[in-house]
Image (cartoon, rainbow, N blue to C red):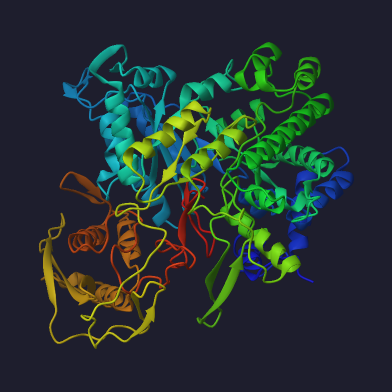
Amino acid sequence: MSRFHAPIAESIWDMKYRFKEADGTPIDGTIEDSWRRIARALAETEAEPAKWESEFYAALEDFKFLPAGRITAGAGTGRSVTLFNCFVMGTIPDTMPGIFDALKEAALTMQQGGGIGYDFSTIRPRGAEVKGVAADASGPLSFMDVWDAMCRTIMSAGSRRGAMMATMRCDHPDVEAFIEAKKDPARLRMFNLSVLVTDAFMAAVKADGPWELQFDGKVYKTLNARDLWNRIMRSTYDFAEPGVIFIDRINTANNLGYAETIAATNPCGEQPLPPYGACLLGSINLPTLVTGAFTATAQMDAAALDRLVRIAVRMMDNVVDASRFPLPQQAQEAAAKRRIGLGVTGLADALLMLGARYGSDQAVALTDRWMHAIARSAYLASVDLAREKGTFPLFDAEGFLASGNMQRMDADVRAAIAQHGIRNALLTSVAPTGTISLYAGNVSSGIEPVFAYAYTRKVLQKDGSRTEEEVVDYAVRLWRETHGDAPLPDHFVDAQTLPPLDHVKMQAAAQKWVDSSISKTINCPADISFDDFKEVYMAAWDQGCKGCTTYRPNDVTGSVLTVAEASDKTPAEAPATVRQTSDGAEVVYLSDPLDRPAALEGQTYKIKWPGSEHALYITINDIVIAGHRRPFEVFINSKNMEHFAWTVALTRMISAVFRRGGDISFVVEELKAVFDPRGGAWMRGKYVPSILAAIGGVIERHLIDIGFIAGEGLGLKSDPKAAVMAVGETPRGPACPNCGAYAMVMKEGCMTCNDCGHSKCG
């Protein structure tokens, strides 16, 4: 009998985590083989490998402990891979050689698939004097553009999709430009942006006082703190970025405050890290530890939770020694501090099984109790490891126990650390778990509320056909098994209907016992007022969170609900199915490629590529469906016959994609990611890595001009062949760049595909 709860779980295991030969031949025959492989690999460093292999296997069995994807896919394969998910790179020097040395380190790290975080506050502001060269500095944002191009180049060479986090201090002179950088939809696509907000700044905001922007002791500008805060809020309200990181709170709480200063996080924000710090992640699957689900005696098995946490800490500590690292500095940092990030997944499902509504006082109390228990067990397990194997090399009892985190910890835990030391400098974190949560039976992700209780997923079969499969939330599946078709109780709420401040309460309850940080998205309704939106961030500050990430559907960020209305202007040339929604609106779904009308309207663009004698002329013709323009075909012409064959092939392929309908914005993404090994060119002040990327830029500009797209990752602005759904059906989002499904949703600070598990952050 299969251990998997749903076909999607087995599919994700086979695609992402199953060990295979280079030609695709499976080595792991079953999921049990994968668990055995991981257990054996992590037990190799033990004095009694056989004993601990058995213990580790028992923890992995039935998805109770879920190591992060890098561990699950890489441990025991014999391949020289990193088992760490993300990194914060070294401090960027404010010199040209130092900046490009840092760029090289970032490229080497991303080449192995690691997401990276960087603080760009160390680079002098735009217009500052550059002594010795009689020039003004171009500022940190210009170098962020270089990083962005590097990430595209690494991806176009076939590396695993990477993600980057850029941070900037709230007192840097270029922070205003940083805040608004992504208003340009073509800029910094590979970055998540967050402002490092200090305690002093928040005090100035509360007092409506002045705020100085300065660098290297020089004040460049003084402005009102509340005005700057409102600019951050307005950009986040309109464009979903930047995020906010309460950096002083992070450093005050840090167990290692005596040995390091943190100025950046990994791309999803759950791991604030020092220069060259790396995040090692794993999650306790809480619903697997609930007994008596949906009964009056339902409870978390405290003894089982304690045992599982202790084993998980030991496994993750062994990963530090088993892993490889892209850079030697990263290996040294990991060995010196032995930082791990043990978190949870399925919190919302576990609460449902106990009858608690997510966001209620009961749910907050249970979350506090469970996270406290996990922190306590983790710290005591690490103390036991220190007695057996030694403390982490940089351990200093006085400095460690003086941290804000340890001030909250139980007295007996503090006493044990003072007497015996501790093996791991930091132990807890709540990371995005979208893919591993699907793999474990579609448990709710991390500490997020359930996003959708059930939805239909299209599965691509080996013969090219697609079948439909219902994906059901873990707790709902258990409810159906015991209650049949009985309606779900009132405490079953989802992310779409939950008040934003309930999200904040839950994040704050968990953060109290998490020594690193939490990746979480606070979903806000599209019609939330700006003042209410700002209150979410102020509540996160007031309640002790270390950062805040929100998602508000709008014309710029896209919507989780896509409904396309038909009109009487739908041409006969477009074969379609018309479905009625619950409110009477019609949805048009194009089931076949569009036929070409006799005449089309379009636009012709000219590209003059350096080194080529003749220009390229790109014509894009549009069709009008349901009153909206969408691209239909592309032609490329030039007097230069050298390009004839590939331009014909390219235009035919792009036109075929256009005529299929749906979200064709991925065409732009793919073209713009192509780099020419001979070098690109500067066009209108921007570096374009290839002539194909330039063509992609032209198509992108055209799609924006006709209102088809509104920027990065937005999918369709108005397309009748978008994913069809009636009002009240499962929410769906923009198209996934990996599988093409209209199932991208914002969860745990990352755009994640509900169909294939693809995540922008991993």
| Residue 149 percent coordinates (x, y) | 33, 46
Left or right: residue 489 compared with residue 693: right
From the viewer's perspective, is residue 160 above or below residue 645?
above
At which x and y percent is residue 177? 25, 33
Q: Is residue 358 left or right of residue 385?
A: left
**Which residue appears at 52% of the width and 47% of the height?**
112
Q: Image point 29% across, 78% down: which residue?
A: 659
Res. 31 in view: yes
Left or right of residue 52, residue 555 in this image? left
Instruction: Note whether residue 79 is visible.
Output: no
Q: Is residue 331 above or below residue 654?
A: above
| Foreground of the two, 9 or 233 | 233
Relative to 352, is 754 on the left or the right? Answer: left
Query: Which is nearer the eye, 667 or 449?
Result: 449
Q: Position of residue 308 (x, y in %)?
A: 79, 43
Q: Quadrant of the N terminus?
A: bottom right
**x, y percent for residue 331:** 61, 33
On screen, residue 598 above or below 493: below
Q: Nearer the viewer, residue 72 or 184?
A: 184
Closer to the camera in the image, 477 or 466: 477
> Compared with residue 103, is residue 112 higher up or lower down, i.e. above or below?
below
Q: How many marks?
A: 0
Quarter occupied by residue 436: bottom right
